Amino acid sequence: MSDQYPPSSENRRGGDEAPGASQTGAASAGDPGASTSQRGALRGRQQQQHGPGLGPPGLIGTGDKPKNFRTSFNRLVGRLRPDAFRIGIVTFLAVVSVAMAVSGPKLLGRAMNIVFEGFINKKLPVGVTKEQVIAGLKAQGDTKLANMFSGLKLNPGHGIDMAALGKLLLVVAAIYLLSSLFAWVQGYIMAGVVQRVVYRLRREVDFKLARLPLKYFDDHPRGDILSRVTNDIDNIQQTLQQTLTQIITAALTLLGVLGMMFWISQILAAISVVTIPLSIAVTMMIAKRSQKQFGLQWQRTGSLNGHVEEMYSGHNIVKVFGRQKEAIAKFDEGNDQLYKASFKAQFISGIIMPTMMFIGNLNYVAICVVGGLRVATGALSLGDVTAFIQYSRQFMQPITQVASVANVLQSAVASAERVFELLDEAEEVPDPAQPVVLRKATGQISLKDVSFRYLPDVPLIEDLNLEVQPGQTVAIVGPTGAGKTTLVNLLMRFYEIDRGSISIDGTDTRKMTRDDLRHLFGMVLQDAWLFGGTIRENIAYGKDDATWEEILTASEAAHVDHFVRTLPEGYDTRLDDDSTNISQGERQLLTIARAFLADPEILILDEATSSVDTRTEVLIQRAMNKLLRGRTSFVIAHRLSTIRDADVILVMNEGRIIEQGTHKELLAARGFYYDLYNSQFAEALVEAS
Amino acid sequence: MNKLLLTYLKPYRKELLLVVALVLVQTFANLFLPDLNARIINNGVVTGNTGYILRTGGYMLGVAFVLGAASIAAVYLGSKIAMAFGRDARSALFRKVESFSQREINKFGTPSLITRNTNDVQQVQMMVAVSLTVMLGAPLMIVGGIVMALRQDVPLTLSLAVILPVMGAVLYGIGGRAIPLFRSMQTKIDRINQVMRETLSGIRVIRAFARTEQEHARFDEANLDLTDTGLRVQRLFALMLPALMLVFNFSSVAIMYFGGQRIAGGHMQVGNLTAFVTYVMQILMSVLMATMLAMMVPRAAACGDRIQQVLEVEPSISDPMKPVFLAGLDGGRRGVVEFKNVEFRYPGAQDPVLSGISFTMYPGQTTAVVGSTGSGKSTLISLIPRFYDVTSGSIEIDGIDIRDLQRDELWKEIGFVPQKAFLFSGTVASNLRFGSEEATDDDLWAALAIAQAHDFVSETEEQLEAPIAQGGTNVSGGQRQRLAIARALVKRAPIYVFDDSFSALDFRTDSLLRAALKREVADATVIIVAQRVSTILHADQIIVLERGTIAGLGTHQELMNTSDTYREIVYSQLSEDEVA
């Protein structure tokens, strides 16, 4: 087959096209993962860039270079090991398929010879022998023609042997059919191998994430982790699929074609071989430049996108502060820069195809001429020349393929490296082998000499001692950012304490499994977390076997029943990703209902209700008070009444517990709490009275 | 999309024509090469004419050069046109969106506008580039190839009548199945993304409720689902290439056989057979290319339509034809803001968000707006800078309807602090100078001091040059709000609008800030939306909003006596004995 355009790139693109398309959801301004999801979006677009007509796709690398190519590459290959047998079969099938495909043109060349011989024979008179013809020609002084004829099977006067031609062509057709069949089976098996590898990888990452300490999630932006699970693994999937089959077939085809070419004619083969380094050199030269331009293009797309995102997100601010002219001027500048870079990238990468075609054509011309001369002198049959032309066309294709695979592989290994990095993170201390199980705790909690630091050299909690009796309420107060959640993190063992011990009903929490420990706790946080599911499922989150009655009771206790029933689908209302269909306050009420249903011994509450309207606020307050009753509880307190009624108040500032006592004790001490209390509430009291 | 292409490709008409011409040259050259090859065989090889072979070889070389040059020139022009098209479309979009009011922004949504401005343009631009460099050649090649094939041998060309439909059937059969699968694969990737995002954002809750197992099951379900679809897609694609190869190869075999018959019958020359095979392959390749690229068109067209939608929207708020100017600062201006029976409803909405709103604010006074969520507080104040226009009634500044002012002039009057404190990437200083380029460092520090942001800024090493990430994500919510307040103060406007701008501050900072504000911007007109009662207690007038109407207007004391709604709000936050 004569392919002006490497069809391999067509095939590849199919796989590339669909994903990446939707990676567009621009990160909202407040999203801490904004920069990384931006990156995700970029990647998505980079993949699209392997679009049609851009020449060898992989040459437009993603710009991501792995840090340690060999190690990560080996590790990636190692993940294929469970499928080694299948890969063996694939390789075998590839060998057979390629061998067959490669023999096709040679056989077709023989068919051409049959046609040509018949053509010549028909011109010769019947009954003359080949020797006579050649002798006759030599006698006429036409040595050239004589030489050519000496290489042919002549049977003068008989014309084309259609029966022989038909038979031969049937064989060729059968070979082609089998070759395609094997190629298909090979791709079919490979698809399974790749999908399994990727499935295992995703699964492993998911399990790994469950074993990572919370600290990991504090240190790594959500968008970044997310991008590793989706974009990176997706990238691996796509590249593996392309490279594994391609690299095997391309290498084999190259070998096979070269072999056939040398078999047919060493001189012609030598001419074609010269084009290999030539095309590789040209491709590399162009690709290097275009890669730089593509890098620049993505960088500038990124910064322009950043500007647009910023200006659109702050649209009103830009207006009211009269900055539109500046915004447009900056946009124009970035837009022009992007234009320049993308034009260059597009042009330079676009040159590759015409250049390769040009080299291919030079080769074609050389073969036509030299081949023609060789046939004329009888050194070669016409069929061999036509076969050779087909081979030489075929043989450019695997070269470009191998070159592009090498590039694509870079990006896949870089992705794999990021995934492996995550898999290598240090895990939490494992649960004890023989854990103590507290069936029913009273809720007595004691902290003895507890010390904890997030950073080794920044002391945070030092030698904290605290005794909480069953049913008591501990209020945690302090200004914004005082680290009030640190204590919660320690109680629930989201973080491990450095020294001392925390025990519940006399049992060190480290002697229990984390799951058992956490089952004792209920948690209602300000950032009410709901997942995409129905309201009913969300309430039943903490209790798998909750009955409908239990759910209803919990809902009524948390005052959610009423508003849920006003929703068109009631308890079966699906909460979407950001739950925009219910308000912030209602979200919080749902998490309270969840805590009611789970009926924990110990409760952790965050009172902050910043963007809740007053009526919902009243409901939340009532529900919380009800929930507190009879349970040991830790309240991150914002309400005066809660604080004053608390059994113990922990005053925190700059991450540390600086005072501890009852309301009266602390006021009498005239310390930090005294100031805080006065500044926060006194004014309101004075003015209100 | 056509309109979009027409509008933005028009300036490049000449270049476009040139590209078409170059592609024509390319096609001719491409088709000419096999023809010359046929001549070498027919007139050179068969007759053993070496001179002819060499001469024709020379021609072929020349044609190859022309082909190469034309291709590169076409790529150059094609890239230039496509990228310039993209640049122009982006620029038009950005300018359009900048002219939008909040209403148009809401209509599309900010993320969608961003996507349209970059990704969608990118898609269309790529399609233009590919069309110009590759796709344009395909139909020419198909037509040219058929003509050339006909020239070689007419009856043999009939074989195309079988080959092309078969090829079409293969492409349609596989592609038709693949496209829906791709789409479903995308949804499944989104699903994985969603499950993972939930797992990450709810990690504390998941662990607190010891639900790791169930989350694994949820993820595994999504994972299996995706794997399954991925498998189907890839298996389908495993069929694609072998099937196409089969079509190609069977075509050569068939042509060889029937061509052999034609030659045997003396209807055709040998060289023409080789040329013929080459033409058929070129035609098939072009069909393949055209199909593959055609798959790109619907997506690009969808993007093009999305762009066009934005470009076609006329902003609902624009400057008046004959603007009125506010008197200069010395001309006895005072900064009185008056709402006159204001009504506002969203387009097409049955009920107004606000109705019958009338009140006046004077310089040196603070007006507070309270009310439950959805009572229309934010809407009310967004009418002042004309983010929206009133649907009836009017808002006047010093007796002039704000719709008679140029918007730039109106905005100069207002120091605005949004509910969501949005900072821009840059430094503290660049953010503070947003409304007033010429403010000195001292001005900035003074504003920071009022906004209670002096301390944390001065604690940073870079001081005013401390970097701010986009959206202000590298500072805490409270700090962000205080910087946004300082930014408005630097502007030194006669009117200040605070939209629930103290919510992330603790009580202490809140009260210090308000005290400083009272001191420093004593002569300004201030309007504050707040949730917290303590924030508004000492306002000069308090507007109680309920379902878009004024349910009470007066001082704290007056409202405590007259307004049930107000009392309810107050008691929900302070216990009775605290108020009394």
Image (tube, coloured by chain):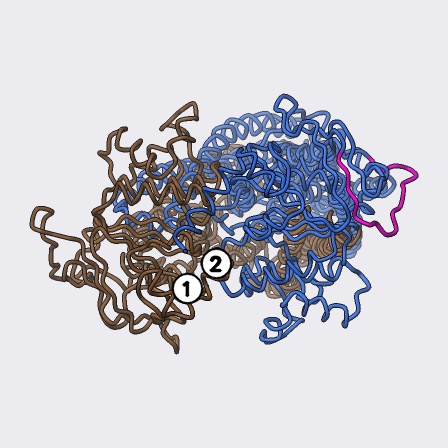
Residue where numbered disc 2 is placed: B143
Q: Is residue A446 magenta?
A: yes
Say the numbered circle drawn on residue A616: none
Q: Residue drawn at (54%, 61%), measured in percent from left and top?
A: A617
Residue where numbered disc 1 is placed: B371
Colour used to depict chain A in the structure image: blue
* Chain part drawn in magenta: A430-447
Chain letter, colour brown: B
Q: Is residue A381 left or right of residue B279?
A: right
Q: Secondary structure at mark 1?
A: loop
Q: Position of residue A255 (x, y in %)?
A: 73, 32
Residue B275 seen by the camera:
no
Q: Chain of mark 2?
A: B
Q: Position of residue A206 (x, y in %)?
A: 74, 45
Q: Nearer the viewer, residue A324 or A74?
A: A324
Q: Is residue A612 magenta?
A: no
Q: Quadrant of residue A421?
A: top right
Q: Residue drawn at (70%, 44%), measured in percent from left and top?
A: A241
Residue extending farthest bottom: B350
Residue extending farthest top: A457
Identified by mark 1, the residue type is Gly
Q: Secondary structure at mark 2?
A: helix
Q: Nearer the viewer, residue A454 or A173?
A: A454
Q: Quadrant of residue A508?
A: top right
Dot 2 surroundings within 10 Å: few (below 14), some, or many (20 or more)?
Answer: few
Q: Is residue A283 left or right of residue B377?
A: right
Q: Residue drawn at (36%, 57%), measured in percent from left and top?
A: B5
